[in-house]
Image: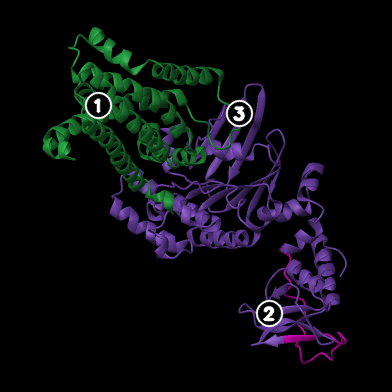
Chain colours: A purple, B green
Amino acid sequence: MPIPPAIEFKNVTKTYGENTVVDDLSLSVPAGKITVFVGPSGCGKTTSLRMINRMVEHTRGEILVDGQPNTGRPAHELRRSIGYVLQQAGLMPHRTIVDNIATVPVLKGVSTKEARAQALELLERVGLDRSFAKRYPAQLSGGQAQRVGVARALASGSSILLMDEPFSAVDPVVRSDLQNELLRLQRELGVTIIFVTHDIDEAITLGDQLAVFARGGRIAQFGTPEEILRQPADDFVASFVGRDRGMRRLTFASASDVTIHPLQALETPWQNWQLKVEDGKPAGWLVDGRLIPGGSLYREGASLRDALDSVLSSPSGWGVAVDNEGKLLGLLKSDDVLDATETERQRRYGVGA
Amino acid sequence: MNWLSSNLDYVAQLAALHVLQALIPLVAGTLIALPLARLAVGRRRDGRSTELSTTAGKVRRATVINSAALLYTIPSLALFVLMPLILGTSITSLLNVYVALSLYVLAMMVRSSVDAFESVSPITLEAATAMGYTPVRRFWMVELPLAIPVMVAGLRVALVSNISMVSVGAVIGIQSLGTLFTDGLRRNIPAEIIVGIVGTVLLALVLDRVLAALGAWNTRWRKA
């Protein structure tokens, strides 16, 4: 018995005068998963998202939310039942953080006291200290504001979360943190998330399912990230997933087969390069008495893409493997990594080896 | 100084009348200006759309703002004299001042309230709608509180302008601190004139500070 979809678009069309923004969209969004709408700007992905909670009213067709047509009740009631995270957090500048998070429960008639108590829990849940509660939005950084935005959406108690390019305005480091937090929250809470982005890397990182939108509001391909990278449906999808497709695909391959060479076991085949280790952690390479910062680290259990990058970015040509605490495990040899990609390729197409 | 100490009660009474004549129109005019201004602003665009407001919207906005501005060009003395004819009140009735100054406040506050409403970020309004605010609740809980900073700036100008215009009423015999100028001039008592001027300025300064402080207290979130 398949789980009924959380949201279903049935032949949905949106036109503005002569302009068709979304054209005959039919799509089932699976419950309890992250579905990413990805595509170039102006392709109707945001419009499609906003039609779900009727921030935009569709012209034709039907949108089912938990099996019910979304036009079956007043728009404000529907919106209170669906979490929504906006691009620029969109917090109420005149309310404290705790009251911002408590917005929807208060609108629903929960007492302020109760709503605030719940808001404090959510604040911690999204990784912010309770001391933030009494501050105002202007006192937060972009990343912190967006965490509050997520907490506010979760406070609706909804099993559905709509996210409209929520991380596009923060710097790459914070962005990556937020993405990981979102994945953790989604695993913990099992909510259905629809996430809009124009960034294919973000889509691959987050999505269980991707819907690739083409211009004119048409879905060019719907499938798992791996399917889309492996077999783009057409030239548009192929060009959109980009020329780093080969590298991106390695994201889905495990590097667990790649041998990690213990530091001591090797007879310095990297010639005069010497790995500097501080407190068991790698701290760059020494060569001719100079210290050169190390490349990216391969964390045990990460993907083949990370393994390859650690090799390519290492000054010595040897990738550095660490455990989850960042302690040195050993070194990766570029030949081993390339062999692993070869094995992966053969396994993928079921030939050779 | 002697003049002041021997007429302290009289001056205090005039000052009280002066405050009354400045504040009542301020409140009344603002209360009328707010709905007009909100009407002129019309439906706010949402955060993502880039299309400009409709032609009908622009016409409505321009009509409201320009008629308000026109109102302001009527000379205050003329208005004070005209009021009894229109309202059927006696020439020295306080009601004349209330109505006339309310019109000036209206003229000023329509403009600054339009600016105030337009200063509220469309993204915030959109977020409020997306959270499930009904339009009415969104106005009272989000839009109006966020419009306060710009509105207070307008209120301060209107208040100070009111305090100065209340004095004009003295010319036609309506009691205020302005009475000290006309009376002092007629009876040639320079001290009385000086007390009138200093009193008016002090009143304007003090009330302006109070209003600014009230505004700041209401918008603590901005100092963050």
Q: Nearer the viewer, residue A193 or A30?
A: A193
| Range of residues picked out in magenta | A252-276
Q: Which residue is mark 1?
A: B181
Residue A192 visible in the current orientation:
yes
Marks 2 and 3, how far apart in space? 52 Å
Q: Residue at x 83, y 64 (%)?
A: A345
Residue A67 visible in the current orientation:
no
Marks 1 and 2, how far apart in space? 87 Å
Q: Which residue is mark 3?
A: B51
User: For numbered disc 2, what is the local secondary structure?
Assistant: strand
Q: Which residue is mark 2?
A: A322
Crowding around mark 2 (Cα neighbors within 10 Å: few <14, some 14 to 19, many 20+) is many
Look at the picture and state if B7 lies above or below A318. above
Question: Hey, what amino acid is under mark 1?
Answer: Phe
* Residue A126 percent across, percent down from the top left: 48, 61
Q: Nearer the viewer, residue A334 or A336?
A: A334
Marks 3 and 1, how far apart in space? 56 Å
Question: Hey, what amino acid is under mark 3?
Answer: Glu
Earlier in the chain: of badge 3 and badge 1, it is 3
The mark lying in front, picked from 2 and 3, is 3
**Is-magenta flag for residue A32?**
no
- Chain of the residue displaying label 2: A
